Image (spheres, rainbow, N blue to C red):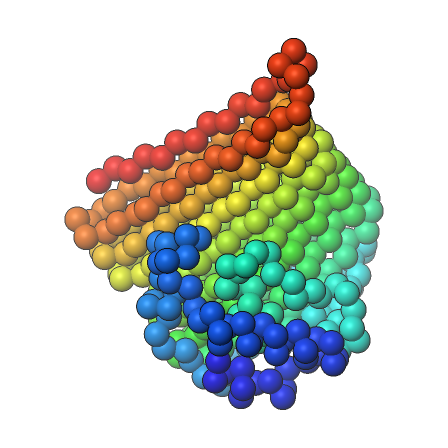
């Protein structure tokens, strides 16, 4: 945690935030980075894979044109956010401003005891965006959360809240057009209110020597619909964690993931979905093309809470291995907790999980 020692004095936050940062940094020192002995990290030995940690300084870069034409760009350049642009129905602030003012929009709690990304990000994150989209807003153009860097070390946190009846497209884009190796962590929280219909795209195209640690935390309200698209096409060491809580009846999650892996890279998507109420649906399809000596991982867990009847969930992981030295590990899991309904009144859920690898 030498990096934290160097950065601590320049990181934003009031006294309470500083105390929480110190706590998280202390836990990293005490526990160390996770190894294969930690079940959630069994296929991604972070302590072994993350051997070199870049320094903070990076080359100067500028924001790039948006991935989708006509998008409104919220840029994060070398870890520094700008003021929010003027968009109808959109309000908010930067994460740095929220930390300094003590705004509860930025919280440093961990998702679980093995949340290494949460610890790293919470201890060292410096900026990002807090975005609130008002009830009934129909975004006329996509929003792009664009994180661009020129090498070094950058940690950001975003929160996007979609009000009732909102709709639109948001792109979270991570890109390194030039520069030395980088260590990047990003934690984004998405909350979808009642009847919201959102398409959320994560496009990760870091540099050949970069490490990207990403975490997406999602909550779906009543009748909320989320289309989540994830593309990994860069980075030497990549870990994407998606934690989704379905809390409103009628909610639906559609996840589509594409991993394009080559060289000696290592990419891990770890997915945890909780169907916490009845009458909810989800479909997850992850497709992988693996070349050279690249390694890929997909861990997918579907949890069905007690009394969450009529859950319809499907998960599929398909892999094409293009080299004798390429590898891909898939670990699907299903956890259905006992129901308190009687057999006469219970309406069972339907769960389908499939993995296919072709060499």
Q: Position of residue 53 (x, y in %)?
A: 41, 78
Q: Is residue 179 left or right of residue 241?
A: left
Q: Viewer-proximal residue, 228 or 191? A: 191
Q: Is residue 9 left or right of residue 2?
A: right
Identify the residue at image location x=37%, y=68%.
47
Q: Is residue 231 left or right of residue 146?
A: left
Identify the residue at image location x=61%, y=78%.
22
Displayed quadrant of residue 239: bottom left
Identify the residue at image location x=27%, y=62%.
264
Q: Position of residue 31 (x, y in %)?
A: 47, 70
Quadrant assignment for the C terminus: top left
Q: Is residue 97 left or right of residue 112?
A: right
Q: Compared to 268, does 10 lie above or below?
A: below
Q: State whether residue 46 appears in this view.
A: yes
How many numbered callouts? 0
Q: Position of residue 355 (x, y in %)?
A: 36, 35
Q: Position of residue 127 (x, y in %)?
A: 64, 73
Q: What residue occupies the far left of the structure in this picture?
A: 324
Q: State whether residue 142 appears in this view.
A: no
Q: Viewer-proximal residue, 141 or 246? A: 246
Identify the residue at image location x=55%, y=37%.
303
Q: Viewer-proximal residue, 207 or 285? A: 285
């Amino acid at each position: 945690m030498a990096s934290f020692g160097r950065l601590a004095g320049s990181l934003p936050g009031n006294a309470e935030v500083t105390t929480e940062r110190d706590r998280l940094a202390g836990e990293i020192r005490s526990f160390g980075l996770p190894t294969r002995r930690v079940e959630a990290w069994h296929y991604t030995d972070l302590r072994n894979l993350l051997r070199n940690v870049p320094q903070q300084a990076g080359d100067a870069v500028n924001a790039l044109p948006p991935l989708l034409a006509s998008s409104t760009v919220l840029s994060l350049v070398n870890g520094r956010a700008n003021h929010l642009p003027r968009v109808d129905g959109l309000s908010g602030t930067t994460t740095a401003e929220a930390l300094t003012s003590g705004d509860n929009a930025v919280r440093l709690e961990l998702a679980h005891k093995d949340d290494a990304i949460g610890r790293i990000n919470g201890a060292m994150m410096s900026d990002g965006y807090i975005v609130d989209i008002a009830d009934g807003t129909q975004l006329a153009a996509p929003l792009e959360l664009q994180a661009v860097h020129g090498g070094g070390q950058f940690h950001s946190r975003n929160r996007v809240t979609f009000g009732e009846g909102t709709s639109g497209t948001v792109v979270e884009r991570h890109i390194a057009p030039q520069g030395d190796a980088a260590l990047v962590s990003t934690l984004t929280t998405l909350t979808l209110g009642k009847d919201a219909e959102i398409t959320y795209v994560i496009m990760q195209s870091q540099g050949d020597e970069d490490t990207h640690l990403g975490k997406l935390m999602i909550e779906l309200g009543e009748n909320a619909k989320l289309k989540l698209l994830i593309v990994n096409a860069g980075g030497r060491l990549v870990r994407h964690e998606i934690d989704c809580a379905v809390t409103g009846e009628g909610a639906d999650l559609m996840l589509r993931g594409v991993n394009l892996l080559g060289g000696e890279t290592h990419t891990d998507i770890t997915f945890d979905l909780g169907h916490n109420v009845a009458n909810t649906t989800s479909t997850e399809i992850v497709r992988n093309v693996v070349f050279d000596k690249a390694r890929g991982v997909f861990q997918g867990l579907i949890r069905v809470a007690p009394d969450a009847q009529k859950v319809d969930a499907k998960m599929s992981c398909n892999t094409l291995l293009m080299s004798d030295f390429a590898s891909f590990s898939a670990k699907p899991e299903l956890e259905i907790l006992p129901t308190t309904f009687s057999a006469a009144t219970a309406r069972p859920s339907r769960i389908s999980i499939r993995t296919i690898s072709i060499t």
